[in-house]
Image (cartoon, rainbow, N blue to C red):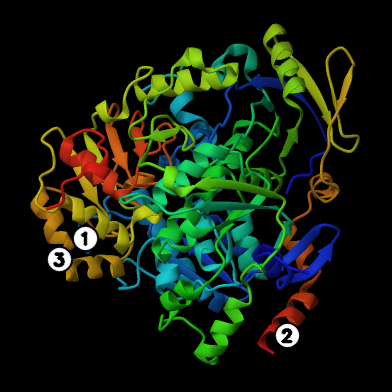
Amino acid sequence: MNPFTTLKGIVAPLDQPNVDTDQIIPKQFLKRVGRSGYEDALFFDWRVLDDGKTLNPDFALNEPRYQGASILLARENFGCGSSREHAPWALDNYGFRCIIAPSYADIFYGNCFNNGMLPIALSDAVVDDLFKATLANAGYELTVDLPAQTITQPDGSALSFEIDAFLKERLINGLDQIGLTLRHEEKITAFEKAAQG
Amino acid sequence: MAKNIYEKIWGAHIVHEDGDAALLYIDRHFVHEVTSPQAFEGLRLANRRVRRPELTYATMDHNIPTTGRGMPIKDPLSKKQVEVMEQNCADFEVELFNVDDRRNGIVHVIGPELGLTQPGFTIVCGDSHTSTHGAFGALAFGIGTSEVEHVLATQTLSQRASKTMEIRVNGTLATGITAKDIILAIVGKIGTAGGTGYVIEFTGEAIRALSMEGRMTVCNMTIEAGARAGLISPDEKTLAYLKGREFLPKDTSWDDLCARWSAFASDEGCAYDRLVELDASAIEPQVTWGTSPGMVTGVTGKTPVLKDISDSSMRAATEKALGYMDLGEGVAMEEVRINKMFVGSCTNGRIEDLRAASALAKGYTVSESLDQALIVPGSQEVKQQAEQEGLDAIFKAAGFEWREPGCSMCLAMNDDYLNPGDRCASTSNRNFEGRQGKGGRTHLVSPAMAVAAAINGHFTDIRNWKFN
């Protein structure tokens, strides 16, 4: 897994609450058996018009100013619904490494960390301010510093964010969860033996 | 100290603790063809094996056609996914209930049917509706594909303890009101993120009165309220359902199993972090009007009026949902006409659902305004049982299509989907934009409400139904 330490990038806004994983990646793309190549599937039904080819000019991510964005700014309960890990894969493949929103659905939140992506939760008011700043300033960029737990705005002012210490450590070091768990293999075996009584 | 069921199951599965995180042992792992290929591939790349293949069971359900069984699957991508599942199960020695197996069906229908789902278990699957198994007093939840790989490799999962919420449904349901109406009313009350960070235990007289099928319907849609899992403490009904099921432990007596399972039930006087109460007698048949399961009202209700909504983001979300659903403000739900109907899914594809649906259908005909009305049993066992009872004959005589089991139009990965502009009465669990097909409009209802809508061509209060 790629480590996540700091990220400076363009912010793209998705101004809708309760964005579900069916929107992040519709079902027709779940027939594939790989983990990559999902960038074209991201927000497909919103991003692409009914002909299946033409980009929807009214969808924010298609605006020239947000091209190359690596930070997605979203609203509450982002990633609700289906457990499909194709959702973080599609976001990651498209170029998003960090999401900022007031809250996330549980399964999606966990799936992000398992793909080296950082979902940051900030208050509604702070997210609201970031939306305003993003819309008001073309090319608006933020610098996310995970070790310092800060987000620095273009004017140099910094916001801080909370994150679970264990998840932070995993992201910074790009640690594979299975490898971490297997350090406790003796305990797993002991648990199994005890259960068999 | 009195403990609730979640605390008991959690405590009994800790392999290793680190602060408030725990490595939990997983008793049962279900896999299906859509969210597992990348997990098995990960094992191959890291040269890892499945630690306990005998605790893992696989089925084909999400992506398979509901017609033309025995013929090759036409869609090459779907065909490939099914073949990859077969190969993975063969390579890693995981038992597969393949499409032609009498035990095949939707993962959350067959787990309980086969006795693979047991009280006190930890159960996971790469599918958010794994919460269904909580009806048996198991801690069951959906996971991502990386976690599927983790469970395959280690038979454990790293978890943080959730808060607990008791949802107590007091009183008795009115005639014709079902488990589906209870859970839709709950999601409507607490919201689609109301359960985030919680595990919910459903209690109260109305929950105790439900059959195991009904309890599965309630727990199934716990995820639509954002909760990690939903549980119901095991009781006599749980034990009666499980007795004699195929995969129960052979080396333990029935009495010992009952004692072990019953001990997981929440203790009298145990505590929860939050309590929500509902009055069952006040619940009417539910219909969703929007693009989220929480956008729901009673069948005698109307779509919202925007100026009555004070919160601006709620108003904007409502306006967008009504726009997608092509519904005006203040429209009576009984005036909303449909052109498609779907009865099935892990929410409502069980025998009790089909019995309820057929009771309404008997002696009636599907409205001419319907383009399609599908009945899709949740499993082969459900299908066989329904055919033995003659339910298929009632459906066919009324003009419904009787299909082979699978997830079908719930997520519309196969050929069962809505076209743009279609409006569907559906017994499934999600009414998200495009869930049942791009541009399709989904109204979530109980099986009886779906059938009534198909017969009349519009939503109908089944409390006034004239049964033949």
Pick the front one: B76 or B294: B294
Residue at disc 3, secondary structure: loop
Foreground disc of the pair 2, 1: 2
Which mark is nearer the camera, 3 or 1? 3
The answer to whether any part of residue A58 appears in the image is no
Write down the residue under mark 1: B71
Is residue B397 found left or right of B117 in the rendered image?
Answer: left
Residue B416: give x, y in percent of width and height.
Answer: 28, 45
**Number of the label disc, if any, that sits on residue A22:** none
Q: Is residue B85 above or below residue A104?
A: below
Q: Which residue is mark 3?
A: B390
Q: Name the one closer to the observer, B179 or B385.
A: B179
* Pointer 1 chain: B
Examine the rendered structure and indicate whether residue A33 appears above or below residue B153. Answer: above
The answer to whether the residues at label 3 and label 1 have Cβ atoms under 8 Å apart is no
Residue at 88%, 22% in the rendered image: A158
Q: Earlier in the sequence, mark 3 or mark 1?
A: 1
Three-letter code, disc 2: Ala
